[in-house]
Amino acid sequence: MKSLIKNFLVFFTVFLLMAAVFSRFGGAGQKAASVGIETLVSQLNNQAVAQVAIVGDKIELTLKNGQSQTVKKEPGDTFSQIVKNFNIEPAKLSGVKIEVRADQGLDYWLAAILPFLLPFLLISVFIYFMMRSVQGANSKALMFGQSQAKEAGREFKGKITFKDVAGVKEAKAELAEVVEFLRSPKKFSEVGARTPRGVLLLGSPGTGKTLLARAVAGEASVPFFSISGSEFVEMFVGVGASRVRDLFHKAKKSAPCIVFIDEIDAVGRRRGAGLGGSHDEREQTLNQILVEMDGFDPNTNVIVIAATNRPDVLDPALLRPGRFDRRVILDEPNLADREAILKVHSKQKPLGKEVSLKRAAERTPGFTGADLANLLNEAAILAAMKNKKIIDMEDIFASVEKVMLGPERKSRILSVKEKKITAYHEAGHAIVAHFMPNADPVQKVSIIARGQAGGYTLKLPLEDKHMYTKTEYVEEIAILLAGYVTEREIFGQVTTGATSDLRRATGLARKLITDYGMSETLGPRTFGEKDEMIFLGREIHEQRDYSEKAAEQIDKEISNFIDQAVHQAKGLVKTRREFLEKTVAALLEKETLEKEEFESIVGEKAKAE
């Protein structure tokens, strides 16, 4: 539309210039005064006229004194008829020079051209729009089967390298070989090594799979094609396969390059199961991906990097050697990695001198790279809302709790009774956690509501842990049930505030039996197959591979674990009643206790042997 308007304006401007030129040549050098026929007759009778020029429907007079005048006459009248009608004597015209000229002014040209030009312009514009709409439809139809991959060139803005990706040392070391393949393919071909066809990045959401793929492209300085797995599949049969062909065709022309397919499980699910959202179009698209990856020329330096957090649902043909040759696992960052990630994301943020990113990293176990980036962003927002120019530790700690539990709900005003119940509930969690030998130390206790929680007890490990014992799990269940036990011990009944704790405790007890084989009664085995299937719109998370009798035993064993945990929690609440009451009093007064304030009441936590 913009080009059409531009062309029309250019054409119209040219036309006006031409009309102005014709008018310039056709008009007189000096603008003539317009007079009536009676003035013409009077001046002819007085012999004041030197020259008469008849131009179309006008009579141009040049007087003997040098003035110019214009007389408008009727279209059908001639100068001779005017002279005759007004009885002007021929002798008075003897000294007058009379000539007839063709009309060449703007009015003449407009009158001559517009009757033909306007219909022509209207028809031309109509035909242009018709042709444009037809061409647009054709081009859209032709582009429907083309890939929608976004391409970043060798020198694209925002170039990312391994220096911009903190942590994941093993993953970067594995991908460094891929970078070397892209930089110096000849070095490997000389010793008979072939370029890896594909690299599969596996990791939880937010661990940096996409960032790492971009870093590989940045390190190798090669074009980077990125597309989501869901962008291949359409409702029309064959479109997905066509887009795959187009994507790999572009990649081969830009080789060496990287093709990045995010969330490949959207198109790469296991074929032939009839479940999991399978249909012919998706399977055809997957078949085309398999063919393209297997059909690479050995000398074609194109590497496919795919990312997923569901490797269990991928088709085995994708995972065989020759397609995705390498699997790179991205774990959740440990303490040192979290500190390094926080340093990367804090480069553009003004931090206070007292800010310790190590302390922040200690408070964020289980956080991914995306969580940590969000944490610092929330801290910056919080500092800005307080009209501060720098971010301090208070902002960072508040953001940790906001990300983990949700924003504070200070508007939720509790009655005196509810506030007291909440204080005992959270104090029960804190006391049991503090005196359990294998539990993590308590960092904060609060009765201020956050998110869905009426209060919270924050306990964090001193170091990253990857393996847990049965004793630690039973103690964790006891801590979860401590609020429930305290309410029953103090008030003789429980409230709905323990609902979430009961659900988590029951789920953990079930995992001890069905997943971890920690039941003495049922023995070292698992119960249930965790295959993902979708049937009639319902997702089934578990296939039962055990009998009803075993299910009954599982229920009994869950109750045994919970009873054991309740017994431990009740014993600590009774024996440490004095500390419980002091903690409740402090919470009712201050509403929030940090680690130092809490330990000033109960003493330092004893280290587990």
Image (cartoon, grey):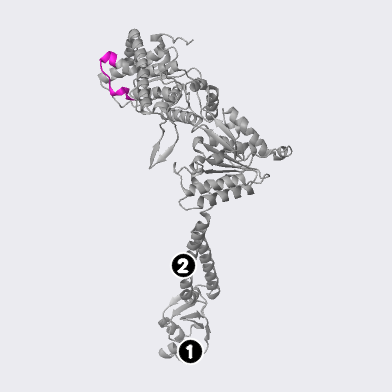
Taking depth in this image into account, of 229 and 73 the one nearest to the observer is 229
Question: In the figure, residue 73 lies in which quadrant?
Answer: bottom left
The residue that label 2 is drawn on is: 126
Local secondary structure at mark 2: helix
Percent across and percent down for residue 435 are 40, 11
Label 1 Cα crowd, 10 Å radius (few <14 / some 14-19 / many 20+): some
User: As drawn, which residue projects farthest toward the right?
Assistant: 190
Q: CA distance from mark 2 to mark 1?
A: 59 Å
Taking depth in this image into account, of 86 and 406 the one nearest to the observer is 406
Q: Left or right of 394: which side holds 168?
A: right
Q: Which mark is residue 10?
A: none
Percent across and percent down for residue 187 are 72, 37
Question: Exactly how many numbered labels are in the figure?
Answer: 2
Q: Earlier in the sequence, mark 2 or mark 1?
A: 1
Q: Left or right of 530: which side holds 199?
A: right
Percent across and percent down for residue 338 are 52, 25
Q: Amino acid at mark 2?
A: Phe
The residue that label 1 is drawn on is: 92
Residue 193 lies, with reference to residue 81, above or below; the image says: above
Mark whose residue sits in front, 2 or 1? 2
Taking depth in this image into account, of 204 and 322 the one nearest to the observer is 322
Dominant secondary-structure state across the stretch colored magenta: helix
User: Residue at the spot x=26%, y=15% of the render?
Assistant: 491
Residue 443 lies, with reference to residue 161, above or below; the image says: above
- In this picture, which residue range is highlighted in magenta? 488-499
Local secondary structure at mark 1: helix
